[in-house]
Image (cartoon, helix red, strand yellow):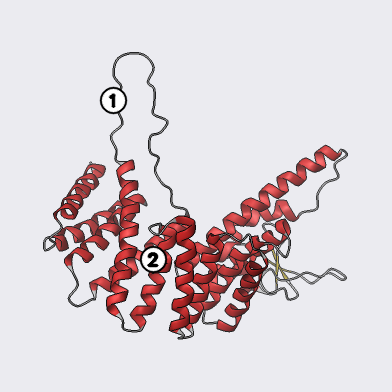
Amino acid sequence: MAINPLANPKDIKLKCELCQKPAFVQCLQCRVTYYCGVEHQKADWVGIHENICDSLAALRQPALFLPSQEERNHRQERQLQKQTELIELTRTTGQKLLFEGKHEQALPAALQSLRFSIDVYGLASIELVPSYLILGEASIGLGRLPQAEEYLAQAQWTVLKMPESSNAIKSKLFRNLGLLYAAKGEYDEALRQLADDIYHASDEFGTDDIRTAGGYFHMANVFFRQGKMDIADSLYRQVTQIWYDYLSKIIQVRTRTPDTPVGVGPVITDSKQEEEDQLDEAQEAEAIQVLNAVFDMREHQPNRKPEDMARIAYSLAMLYYVLYDLDKAKEYGRRAVVVSEGNPDEELSRSIIEFMKICEKVYL
């Protein structure tokens, strides 16, 4: 991270990357990004700038004159492709930081994703909504509820103006509105918004999809705050089952023994052979956050059921195996073995034992 104090050149208005106030500090690495002070420069570096510094230099530096229209069109296409890639990178980074509880760090990534989206799609596009939602959720996490309301109102207005808005976008909007009302202590309204989230996510992805599970999880949290533990318990159980099934499929594909070729001649592979599902960085962070939260709740829950504890511990073991953290996979696997001793579900107990054998083989 390079810092360069500078005097604002006459007749050239330099603005801070984060707050848009007059800038007096320059990043010496890309030389195209400016800040009002060292504090914002450091915040941007930690949040997103370190990952996009070189890309910003290529995008923002004055372009050389190209004599032919074909060359200019080609350059424009490359620039558009780079901007589109940066939208995905900054959104995923911002969402990942939110799931990790790093709300302050998520703001720079969300702001950059909003700028790139405006450059590519314009001010009135539905493509801006994911960035508004990240900004809104970060503001909720920081307790800046009026600011969160402004971001979410902008997102809601954009969705209302676009009849073609997908159920996936609507799901994320209602989830953030649910989080906002929950933060304000308006639990009945929070539950209504989260119910809409689950409805649209189910319509888009299915009721048992990991992208729907987040709505169940946040609804469970609201019921938990209200002291309605029977309902919360049922929803936490559903969240666990969704992730359990999803991770089990990944483990099954990853540990599957390849078919042994028979006879002579070229090996013909089955094009229909199941491929392993992939989690992006944001989904990985979400799984870690959600499953650990449910595990902690179960661990401190009086009169918990052995099956509930075994399943959430086993789900975490599978998650860390998928993330190639074998030490944590074995740690939670051992916990699952211990609590499953009092579990009447023999199939689950056998599955845990088989999983631990797989983990041991990896270490050999």
The residue carrying mark 1 is 260
Q: How many marks?
A: 2
Q: Which residue is mark 2?
A: 289
Q: Classify residue 159 by image quadrant.
A: bottom right
- Where does residue 230 sit, x and y in percent of width and height? 27, 77
Tag 2: residue type?
A: Gln
Farthest-out residue, top: 264
Q: Is residue 333 visible?
A: yes
Where disc 2 sits, the SS reads helix
Mark 2 crowd level (few <14, some 14–19, many ≥20, 10 Å Cα): some
Quadrant housing residue 49:
bottom right
- SS for callout 1: loop
Asked if residue 78 lies left or right of residue 11, the reply is: left
In the rendered view of the protein, which quadrant contains the C terminus? Answer: top left
Residue 2 visible: no
* Farthest-out residue, bottom: 185
Q: Indicate the position of residue 79 as horizontal and vertical percent values.
A: 72, 48
Quarter location, residue 32: bottom right
Q: Position of residue 163 (x, y in %)?
A: 64, 63
Q: Name the one closer to the observer, 85 or 232.
A: 232
Question: Which disc, if any, is residue 176?
Answer: none
Q: 162 and 237: which one is in front?
A: 162
Q: Is 200 placed above or below 222 here? A: above
Depth check, mark 1 against mark 2: the one in front is 1
Q: Is 5 above or below relative to 77?
A: below
Query: On the picture, is 37 further left or further right than 277?
Result: right
Which residue occupies 24% across, 47% down?
359
Kind of residue at disc 1 = Thr
Q: Quadrant of the N terminus?
A: bottom right
Q: From the viewer's perspective, is 154 left or right of 63?
A: left
